[in-house]
Amino acid sequence: MGSTRGEGSGEAAGDDDEDTMVMYIMSHQDEGGKHSCVELQIELPPPKPRHNRAGEEGPVGTVEFSCFPASMNTNVLITVFTDPKWEEPWNLTHKVPDCSVKDFLNIKSCEVPEPCVRLEDVEQRAVVIVPDNYFLRFLYDVMPEFESTNPQDSGKLKETEVQRSFRDIVPCLCIEVWSASMADAWRRRKCPFSKTPGFRGNVWRLSRLQVEARGLALQWTFSAPCNVSGHITLCSRSQSGECQEVSGSRQQLHINTLREFRDVEPHPSLCVQVISEPYINLTCPFETPVPWSVDMQLLVKNVTLIVRHPTRMDFSMCALNGDECELLTPTIQEMADGKHFHISNLSAPRCLQIWRSDVSFSARVTVCPFDTCVRGRWPLAVAVAVAVAVAVVAVLLVADRRWRVKGWIKKIKQDYGTAGPRAGSGSLGTVLVLYSLDHEQYERLVSSFANLLLEARLGVAVDLWKRREMCAQGPLPWTHAQKRQVTEEGGKIVLLFSRGASAKCAEWLQHVRDSTTKYDPYDGFMAALNCVLPDIVMGRSVEKYIVAYFEDLQTRADIPQLFSSLSVYALPSQLTQFLRELGGSLGRRPSWPPYCDHLRGVIEECRLWEERWSPNAEGLRPGTHSRSESATHHSLIEMEEF
C-alpha cells in the first residue's frame, strides 16, 4: 500500500503526480521523552470535490506502521496529516500497557526480579535482598498516604540487603524494586507481611494523634500506616485518670486526613480519645489556665456550689446515680464571687457533675460533697486535736512514760480496731505496706503484691483492706497506729514507690522550704509521709524501713536520694532477697509460682494502662502536677532545718 521514505524526514516524496500524496505520522510521549516522525508515500485516487462525495462511505486505503518506540505504562499521542491536505489532521492517544501483560515479559524493561524477604525471629528483624544495580523502596498500601518518620521510608535505597526491625513492620508495608540503570523502569511491588498476624500490633504503635485548637474548633488528624476502624470522642478526664465520654461528640475514625470538633470549650480536663479495640489513645491538648473553677459548701444535706468564671458563662449540673446522671435544677444566685448553685435536701450522698451549657462540648467537673474520707477537708478542730495528740505523744516519749504510751496505743486499738489483715498464727513476721494510690490499676497491683506477702507467711497491714476503718479514724491516726503495732511486733515498714509516691515525697520535703504543693494533704500516702519521713530524715529507727519498686513501672533513679541509706529492692527480679529481709519464706509451696506469674501479669497490665493514659501518668512524675488539683499541703509535723 505504501512505503516508508524515512524517519524524521520533512521532504516531500516523488513528483507532483495527482495520484500520489505524502502522509506524515508522528508520535509524542511526554513521560518517556520519546518523539518520532515517519514520512510515507502512498498512492490514492485523487481527491474529488466535496460536492461530488455524496453517497461515498468507508475507507479508501489502510496504512500500518508499528515501529514507534514507547515506554511501558505510558500514553502516546499519535498525529496524522497528509500533503496535499486530504482531511483535517487526526489525533489519537494510545495507552501502552504495563508489564503485567504476559506478552511483554520478554521485554528487557519488564525483567524485574522479585525481592527476597527473610524473617529472622532471633534478631527480631526482616532482611530484604535484591540484585545489584536495582533500587528498593518501602511504602504503605493505604490511602490517603501515611507520612512516615522512619528514615528507611524517606526514598529509594540502592542496597543489595536492607534490614528492618520487626517493630517497624506493619501488615500493609510493601516493597518496590526497579532497575537503577534504566530510565522510567517498570517497578515490581510485593507486600510480604500482609498475612503475618504478629505485625498487627505495630499499626497502633506507629499511629499518632495530632490535635490543634483553633478558637472554638478542635482539629485532629489520626495518622496510621494501615487502615484501622474505630471512633474518636471528646472526654472529660477526672483526677483519677479516667475519661468520661462527652455526649454527642463521637465521630467515625478517618485516617490521614484533617477533621475537627466544632464549638469546643478549651478546658485542661477536656481530652480527645481514640478507641480502636483493644487500643486507646488519649491526648489532652489544652494548656490554657482553668477558665472556671468550682468550690463547695456543705451544710447537712444542703449543698452550695460556687462557680467562679471571668466572663459570662452558663452552666448545667446533674447528680450521679450509677451510670446515669439525673439533671438538677438548683436555685442560682449571681454573686460577686461568681454563680452560687443551691441544692436542698440532696436525697443521698451522691456526686455532682457541672459543665458549661453555652457550648456544644464542655469538660465535666465532678464534686463529691459527702466524700469526707479522701476529698473532704477535716474541720479545724480535728486538725488541732491531731496536732495536740502528736505533741503529747512526743512529750511522753521524751519522759519515757512507756506505760502511758502503751495504754494510749491499746486505747486506739480498742476504739478504732486498727488491726489490719494478718496471716494465721504461723506467720513469720508483720509488714506495713505504704503506697500512693496513683490510679485504680495500681491499686489492683498493690492488692496482688499484698496477697503475695501473705502467701510468703507474712502478716500484712495495708489500707486498701481496711478502708472503712481508715475513713472512720482518719488517715493520720490510722497510719500512726499501724506503724506502732508493726514496730512493737518487730515487723518491717515497706515503702512501695511509684511515680506518684516519688512526686508526693519530693513535694513533702519541698514544704520545708516553700510550704506550697498541689497534692491533697489528706491523701492516705501524704498522711503516711507525716508518720515516717521524720524518722528517715533524722536517722531514727531506719532499720525497720525497706524500699521497693516495680522495675517495669519506674527506675531506681526516680526514688528520692533521701532513701539511699535504706535497703532498696527492684521487683520482681529481687523478690527472693526482698522476702528474705522481711523474714518471709518461699518454702516449697506448689501455689507459689502461680502467685509470681500473676504478679508479673498485673505489673504488665499496669504498665500498659499507664502508656494508654500517658497524660495522667506524666502527671505522676516528680516535679509535675495535675492542673485540676488545687489543694494546699501543710505538714502536720514540723521539722528542724536539715
Image (spheres, rainbow, N blue to C red):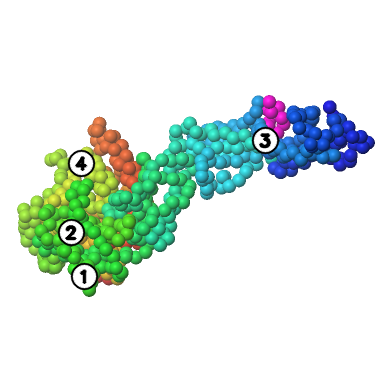
- Tell whether label 1 touches label 2 (CB within 8 Å): no
Residue behind mark 1: 334
> Considering only vertical position in the picture, is 433 above or below 118?
below
Which labelled disc corresponds to residue 95?
3
Q: Amino acid at mark 4?
A: Leu
User: Quadrant location of residue 79?
Assistant: top right
Q: Earlier in the sequence, mark 4 or mark 3?
A: 3
Task: Report how far apart the C-alphas of labels 1 and 3 lie in the structure.
Answer: 76 Å
Q: What residue lies at 40% left-to-right and 62% top-to-bottom?
A: 215
Q: Earlier in the sequence, mark 1 or mark 3?
A: 3
Which labelled disc corresponds to residue 505?
none
Find out whether residue 107 is within the magenta segment: yes
Q: Amino acid at mark 2?
A: Thr
**Secondary structure found at label 4:** helix
Residue behind mark 4: 454
Task: Report how far apart the C-alphas of labels 4 and 2 lie in the structure.
Answer: 51 Å
- Say whether residue 581 is visible: no
